[in-house]
């Protein structure tokens, strides 16, 4: 059994195995309908318990499809409907029950500490479905999408991020280190990565660079990533923060500083960090990106259940 909490904790060899498996499984789905099992239904009889402390559309649906297509089933819990949410039961006891009834646990949480605590007490694998500090399943799937579109290893590409320093960027930084790709981050000075993350970036021998000017960040980019300026856990003055990002909007002019066929990606949901022209343009692959989540999540589940080919 293996946990999937942060990309930095998973060996590159295993991340590559997950991506390879996802590619093969995606091919096999062409002739199958939505709920038909993958050949051999490798997770037949397994129950994935999903718990959301924050809203989710894509993560919820893609994990649902993933476990169903592998032959298993899922139940979705909201923490406020459990004793845990109201403070009437400890994480230790809750984890014991989850381990008794289920085979795997996917948690979207508002606390990184909670992920660690669940990990400590669970006897089944835990998958991080987004925390305040990371969104690893999203970014591993995005690496898959980039390589599918560009038909080459991400290590040969220039990746740019224009937006807030948030959980999704943190996982992209971890991916940049694991997969060894160049990453240029564009954000206002006030919002650039801080603390441990900044220290990590500084150690990367300039492979990861931060710019206060979005044009410099996207220069020569093969792919531009973005995300909402205001994340689910943001406790900021929303109006002021949006104003601070005024010059970082991704529009046709900004895209013109990147490579000609630069791909635009966004984990969704979107805010006003990208205009409709870029979002709906042929080089925006956001819908493919969202649909790939299910394929990659399947291989992440198999990895956690020690069933990866
Ligand atoms: N990208 C993503 O995680 O979407 P949801 O919040 O809808 O799950
Ligand atoms: N950074 C965003 C990602 C949503 C999928 C958030 O945490 O709200």
Image (spheres, rainbow, N blue to C red):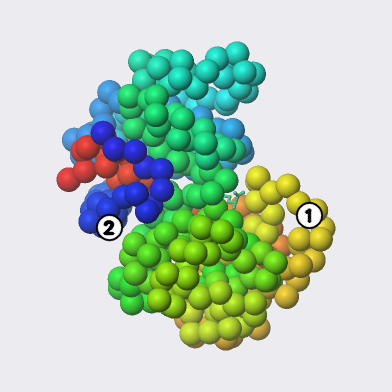
* Nearer to the camera, 280 or 292: 292
Seen at 29% across and 38% down, the residue is: 2
Judge the density around disc 2: few (<14), some (14-19), many (≥20) Cα neighbours within 10 Å: some
Q: Label 2 belongs to which residue?
A: 12
Secondary structure under badge 1? helix
Name the residue at 69% across, 54% down: 230
Disc 1: CA contacts within 10 A as few (<14), some (14-19) or many (>=20): few
- Residue 190, which numbered label? none
Residue 73 vertical placement versus 286 (above, below): above
The residue that mark 1 highlights is: 238
**Above or below for 85 versus 210:** above
Q: Is mark 1 within 8 Å of ligand 2?
A: no
Count of picture labels = 2
Camera-side residue: 83 or 69? 83
Q: Is residue 36 above or below residue 235?
A: above
Q: Residue 124 occupies which quadrant of the picture?
A: top left
Mark 1 vs 2, N-terminal side: 2
> Quarter of the image containing the C terminus?
top left
Q: Quadrant of residue 127?
A: top left
Based on the displayed image, in which of its 4 quarters is residue 249 positioned?
bottom right
Mark 2, secondary structure of its residue: helix
Q: Can you see residue 33?
A: no
Instruction: Name above or below for residue 221 compared with residue 292.
Output: below
Residue under the image location 51 percent in, 75 percent down = 209
| Alpha-carbon span between mark 1 and mark 2 | 37 Å
* Residue occupying image coordinates x 57% and y 37%: 111
């Amino acid at each position: 059994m293996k946990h999937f909490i942060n990309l930095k904790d998973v060996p590159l060899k295993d991340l590559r195995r997950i991506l390879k498996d996802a590619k093969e499984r995606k091919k096999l789905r062409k002739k199958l309908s939505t709920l038909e099992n993958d050949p051999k239904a490798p997770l037949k009889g397994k129950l994935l318990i999903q718990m959301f402390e924050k809203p989710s559309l894509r993560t919820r649906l893609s994990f649902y499809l993933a476990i169903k297509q592998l032959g298993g089933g899922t139940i979705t819990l909201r923490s406020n409907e459990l004793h845990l949410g109201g403070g009437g039961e400890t994480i230790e006891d809750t984890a014991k029950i989850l381990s008794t009834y289920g085979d795997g646990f996917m948690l979207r949480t508002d606390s990184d500490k909670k992920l660690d605590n669940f990990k400590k007490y669970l006897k089944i694998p835990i998958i991080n479905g987004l925390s305040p500090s990371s969104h690893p399943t999203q970014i591993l799937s995005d690496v898959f999408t980039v390589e599918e579109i560009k038909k080459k290893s991400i290590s040969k590409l220039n990746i740019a991020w224009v937006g807030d320093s948030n959980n999704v960027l943190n996982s992209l930084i971890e991916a940049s280190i694991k997969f060894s790709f160049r990453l240029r981050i564009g954000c206002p000075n006030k919002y650039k990565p801080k603390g441990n993350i900044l220290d990590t970036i500084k150690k990367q021998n300039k492979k990861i660079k931060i710019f206060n000017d979005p044009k410099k960040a996207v220069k020569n980019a093969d792919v531009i990533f973005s995300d909402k300026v205001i994340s689910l856990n943001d406790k900021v003055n929303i109006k002021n923060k949006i104003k601070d990002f005024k010059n970082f909007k991704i529009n046709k002019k900004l895209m013109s500083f990147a490579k000609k066929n630069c791909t635009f990606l966004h984990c969704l949901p979107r805010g006003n960090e990208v205009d409709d022209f870029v979002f709906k343009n042929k080089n925006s692959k956001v819908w493919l990106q969202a649909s790939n989540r299910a394929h990659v999540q399947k291989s992440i589940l198999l990895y956690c259940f020690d069933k990866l080919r």
